[in-house]
Amino acid sequence: MKLKLRIWRQSQQEADGRFVDYELDEVTPDVSFLEMLDMLNEQLVESGGDPVAFDHDCREGICGACSMMIDGEAHGPTDRSTTCQVHMRSFRDGDTIVIEPWRAAGFPVIRDLVVDRTAFDRIIQSGGYVSVGTGEAPEANLVPVGKELADQAFDAATCIGCGACVAQCPNGAAQLFTAAKVAHLGLLPQGQPERENRVVGMVEAMEAEGFGSCSNYAECEAVCPKGISIDWIARMNRDYLKAKLKGRTAPAHSG
Amino acid sequence: MSYEIEPGLENRNQVPDGEMSERWLDHRNHLSLVAPNNRRKFDVIVVGSGLAGGAAAATLGEAGYNVECFCYQDSPRRAHSIAAQGGINAAKNYRNDGDSVWRLFYETVKGGDFRAREANVHRLAEVSVEIIDQAVAQGVPFAREYGGLLDNRSFGGAQVARTFYARGQTGQQLLLGAYQALERQINRGTVTMYPRTEMLDVVVDDGRARGIVVRDMVTGEISSHAGHAVMLCTGGYSNVYYLSTNAQGCNVTAAWRAHRRGAYFANPSYTQIHPTCIPQSGHYQSKLTLMSESLRNDGRIWVPRDKDDERPPNQIPEEDRNYYLEEKYPSFGNLVPRDVAARNAKEMVDAGYGVGPLENGVYLDFSTAIERLGKDTIADRYGNLFEMYEKITGEDPYEVPMRIYPAPHYTMGGLWVDYNLMSNVDGLFVLGEANFSDHGANRLGASALMQGLADGYFVAPYTVANYLSDHLGEEVSTDSDAFQRTEAEVRQRVERFLAIDGTRTVDSFHRELGRVTWEYCGIERTREGLAEAIGKIRDLKEQFWSDVKVSGSGEELNAELEKAGRVADFFELAELMCRDALDREESAGGHFRAEYQTEDGEARRNDKEYSYVAAWGWEDDSPPVLHKEDLTFDAVTPSQRSYK
């Protein structure tokens, strides 16, 4: 099939960006969306052009690197998928596809479709862990964890940190990402001792990074490639309120 | 092909003597320590942030060293360990089915076709138990039973259930555990993280590793970092085949640059072709997707008995199906080790029994398991894998058998290290898949995660401290001739790529190199084929250096430039793989030489002549030198592997 691609081009963070149109022919339905961009880039390089920069790595939906708004939808038209899992069978001959980077105050554009998501790492730094040094752990079966609880914690823990939730949110909020980690660790017995400090630290870090606030649009849940539930946000808000009422603060930096 | 041979490397491997089960403990007891108040006086460089690098950086940071950690991804959480699906082995014997440290050790040595260093493997089995404890304490949500205790399953090459798992995302959950520990240390200020930063060379001065030269992948700035020790935790080199299950960015550059600076590269031809991947569907395919080997627990592998059977698989009755693994290997059946499963699948496809539109796969069928256990149980075990399969192929594996075919997946070869995980270059440590040490000629399932974390959490922190203790009070600095020289060479190389301005893309060269390597140094190798491949690789390399086109400049985010550097190193590695495969005139594990097989087509080892580690030393203008480390087996007796 033959496609028209309208792609956001921006040479660096400080530069102005703009849409540039490209045409691409002989795209087959079985290639993935990123392979389609590989085709475009090979043609651009061969013809002396400037290939489109985009983040990608595992190409199987688990590393969370790929990140594109495709026709206004984070990760494109396939449900519960990352961009790398979208295949061109989802498009038709003659389609125009608009491709943009994540757009959010918390994710500055670095180049073309590549954005800076280090804010997510800083949120994790502010409490998204269990403080256990190597070698300090007790025997693994010492603390039983009910299957249902373990499964719930797993569901929250499957977040791949791609940032689609932020990109799709009209407010550019990072609640779903933050809440998923708060829930994962807060559900498990191992996460209880730091539960209150953790939620305070992570929520405050999230706010400091310039992400917007949550107004329950639920767009985040709809585009999340791992299907993470917005119920976790309500849980995080409850945890946060309780912790604040008790006067809890972010975890101490000295560890 | 002539080359120099240097025996005696076994005398430098630092393997302790004594009872096998006491060696690690005894060795640890005699390693030197660095006192807590002195640790902050040491700078340690960790390259890579996967299970090995993430765990090592977090552990050393926690201990109080100054750690600098580098990764090419935008976040350490994205290292390729994240994609490991199946599980992690540990000799907990929770199932009371006869497991023990000894048995895990023995099965790993046997699975590696008796080409691994015995003492390293025993240590791996010992610390496997601690890894599970550590991960659970970090909040890794392993699968559990209704009583709340940890669940286990069995895995290829093992007769006990010792594999811990988190649905089909075990690597992700273990990596996030290490990543969170690492982020905690970053917050404490003990670790400085450099994401989007690629190591382009290691600085070796006076026989010691002094630091590294890196490129900031956003600005293009090239800079040097000095440390008392350098740890490479940079993964494997399966992407030499172009199409593999590895992430796009996985590369050999860090290891290869270290090799060119003096570190021996051991057993490069030991590569693992994973038996259960989705078959290739077309020319533009950029990677092959793995379907966890754990699927072989419940899936049955078959092809139609009649090559020309056109019926859809569900309409082919039992008597017309050839469950070739179950028939050939009655005691292990579908759970034979990876190399055996891969070679058998290739045999079936080569003989014309392949299934699917390109006739390039075999069936992996869950209908019997669904009938026996119910769809819910199967969904619980493999739900996300089935979903992934359906997304890629458009077929529902609950209804139609999966189609699978082998693909390059893991590389057992890597930089040579001694028992302390230090290469032959002083102060240069190599952890995880990047080293050669634990898997011999073939790795068993669920042991890559085990090795990465063992090295990172429980081995290197002791052995690196031991090394550092000799260097207390030494200043490190990038202000030396060696740093200036190395940095200048890195800059020249970047400029050279940009100056070629030829006609072909980096990817087109990589694809061609991949085809040659897969064809001649893949599942099956021959003397003639390997010799031919070396010629082809050299020609292609020459064309690359005269005709590659790298767009853009060095002072910006430039993916073409990044790829050019990696592919240039893959050319040299591919040649060494072929040389190594030529040298090894036997079949062992993932290295199958067609000339050396038993009458029924099994790998034929030659313990008398080839029971050695082949550690190659780089020479600028002459063929590499083969340093041999003879393998001796004190605790086990090498036997012909048999899974019948």
Image (tube, grey):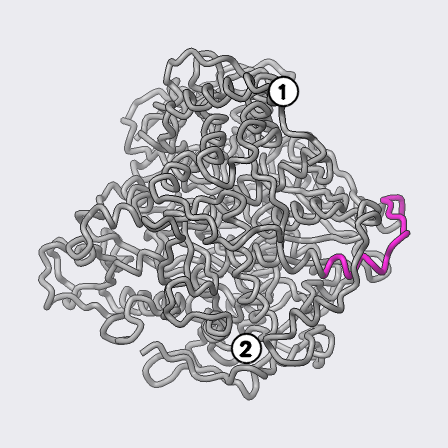
- Look at the numbered disc 1 and give the secondary structure of its residue: loop
Considering every residue shown, the one lying at the far front of the view is: A246
Taking depth in this image into account, of B264 and B10 the one nearest to the observer is: B10
Q: Which mark is residue B89?
A: none
> What percent of the width, then of the height, locates residue B237?
55, 56
Q: Which mark is residue A13?
A: 1
> What percent of the width, then of the height, locates residue B54?
61, 46
In the rendered image, the vertical position of residue A182 relative to residue B465, given as above or below: above
Taking depth in this image into account, of A78 and A62 the one nearest to the observer is: A62
Q: Return the chain for callout 2.
A: B
Same-chain check, marks 1 and 2: no
> From mark 1 to mark 2, how far is it between C-alphas?
52 Å
- Look at the numbered disc 2 and give the secondary structure of its residue: loop
Is B235 on the left or on the right of B83, as rendered?
right
Residue A86 visible in image:
yes
Query: What span is colored magenta in the figure?
Result: B463-480
Q: Return the chain for callout 1.
A: A
Asked where in the image residue B537 lies, by quadrant, the reply is bottom right
Taking depth in this image into account, of B119 and B498 the one nearest to the observer is: B119
User: Which residue position is annotated with label 2?
Assistant: B584
- Tell me the amino acid under the disc marked 2: Arg
| Residue found 9% across the figure and 62% down from its top | B317
> What percent of the width, then of the height, locates residue B160?
37, 68
